Amino acid sequence: MSPSSPDPRFSPSWSPRSSPLPALAVAGVGPVALALARRVLAAEDSALARWSGVAGPGVLVLLGDTESLPWVEGVVYLGRDAAAPALLLPCTLAPDVAPALLERALVARAQVGTPLAVLPRTSHLVPVGAARPVSRDTVRAWLAKQEGA
């Protein structure tokens, strides 16, 4: 997975969502991603078995059922808006454009498989269609690489 940034010419504004989306994923960028990885490593095997994930330089996204998703300070919980099913959007934020229009623009921009996790605060667009079951060894190796960089 290689996260990318949305086209700066198409940067919608975001405001609080009137009704939060149910969480389907949690994402961290930078130091938050490292803290999230450490939280994953501290989780029990039964929790890891409920998650799939993708990671790239400085970004980690875990997918799972709402109740199982871990928390660390600064993470973004993502959910699916019925009007933009190819995107995972922040649960508590809504774009100032129609979600379907945002979806069409971002999918065309990314030119990768969907769904795409949209992280507006850090301008990351992360393809999560290739998410794999979470492995403690893989997370440990990713964390070591990030900390060594």
Image: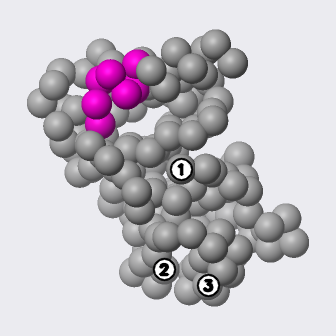
Work out whether residue 142 or residue 117 is closer to the camera in this orientation and state it.
Answer: 142
Residue drawn where x is 61% and y is 15% of the image = 147
Name the mark nearer the viewer: 1 or 2.
1
Q: Examine the residues drawn in magenta and state their main secondary structure.
A: helix
Residue 84 marker: 2
Tell me residue 9's x, y (percent).
87, 72
Tell me residue 109's x, y (percent).
70, 74
> Which residue has dot 1 on it?
1
> Which span of residues is magenta-colored?
134-140
Label whose residue precedes the other's in the sequence (1 or 2): 1
Element under label 1?
loop
Name the mark nearer the viewer: 2 or 3.
3
Element under label 2?
loop
Residue drawn where x is 50% and y is 40% of the image = 55
> Which residue has dot 3 on it?
104
Q: What residue type is labelled 3?
A: Arg
Work out whether residue 103 or residue 52 is closer to the camera in this orientation and state it.
Answer: 52
Element under label 3?
helix
